[in-house]
Amino acid sequence: MRRCVLLIILIASTLHCLAQSSVTANIEPIEMMIGEQATVTLTVQAADDAKVEWPTFQPRQMLVPDVEVLNTQRPSDRTMVITLTSFDGNLYHLPPFKVKINGKEQQSADLALKVVEVEVDTTQLNKFFPPKDVQDNPFLWSDWSLSFWLSVLLLVLIALCGYLYLRLRDNKPIISHIKIVKRLLPHQKAMKEIEQIKADRMVASENAKEYYTKLTDTLRKYIEERYGFSAMEMTSSEIIERLTASGDQQSLDELRQLFTTADLVKFAKYSTMINENDANLVSAIDFINQTKLENQPVEEVQKPVLSEADQRSQKERRVLKIVIWGIVSVAVLLFCYIVYSVWQLLV
């Protein structure tokens, strides 16, 4: 008995809910000109927990012939707005819209839409004119001013770059080469000059002054390069004093005797014998052989020494190259921006 009562109550509630469900449709405006738009508003009245299934329309879909759906919107769960348009004048019948509420289909009332055509007075043809041609937009300096001034700046940069390039071209580069030369060691130079003295037979020459001058100059050059002091500008006694701390006493005694004889010949007109000249030559050769340094590099790296003007010129060339490359980079970026801006204005 209780089950029957519950079943009756459930059926009565369902019928009550279905009796309350409805769909209303409203169109605004009812009358419109060709090409204008009208909106159809569908409103569902149902319980809060009722499931509503709306009809679907695609853009540009024909609701009826010559009546086109532009778009649909859903402002709320119980409302749908359909936007319509038409390009043919007529009175159109819009069939009921179908909405499913809890699986049961409900229909709205029929609607009517009147599309009014534009009336044309064919008796006054002189009032009608053909369509106008495409008109050019007016020239606005504000649109082109930035591109114009940037173009002027670009031309200035190009002229400046050309001027700096001419400066760089006229300022000839200073080409400095590092030379590697083979050099003779001090003792080799001295022995070469002594061999020349022998070849010239100056030992047996009557001009003893010339012989001892060349022989002592050879020794002075050797001592200067070997020991690193200015022997060419020192007297014989000063040279012997500088060598005393580092030389063999016997070789220094022989060298002292050689310089003494040479000073007597050059300044006191002392006459020497051939055997004395030979002995002094041998003493010079012995001194060189006893004091020579053989384990020395025979190649010398000669780096060019640039004057202040050359150094300044090199610095100017480096600065000019940096400035030129900077201007070229800015000019390229500026040119790309100008082309882009003009293209944007023309499109």
Image (cartoon, helix red, strand yellow):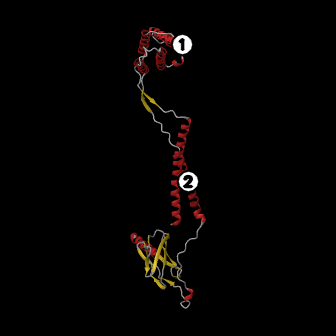
Circle 1 residue: 267
Residue 219 x, y percent position in the rendering: 47, 17
Q: Residue 106's spot in the image, x, y percent?
A: 44, 77
Question: Dot 2: what SS?
Answer: helix
Which quarter of the figure has residue 295?
Answer: top left
Tell me residue 148's x, y (percent). Answer: 57, 61
- Residue 54 lies, with reference to residue 285, above or below; the image says below
Q: Amino acid at mark 2?
A: Ala
Q: Residue at x 57, y 54 (%)?
A: 156
Badge 1 amino acid: Phe
Residue 46 in view here: no
Which residue is pictured at 52% across the width and 58% down the height?
Answer: 337
Q: Which residue is mark 2?
A: 159
Q: Are marks 1 and 2 in contact (CB under 8 Å)?
A: no
For the residue pair 84 and 208, the one nearer the viewer reads as 208
Looking at the image, is 158 positioned above or below residue 65?
Answer: above
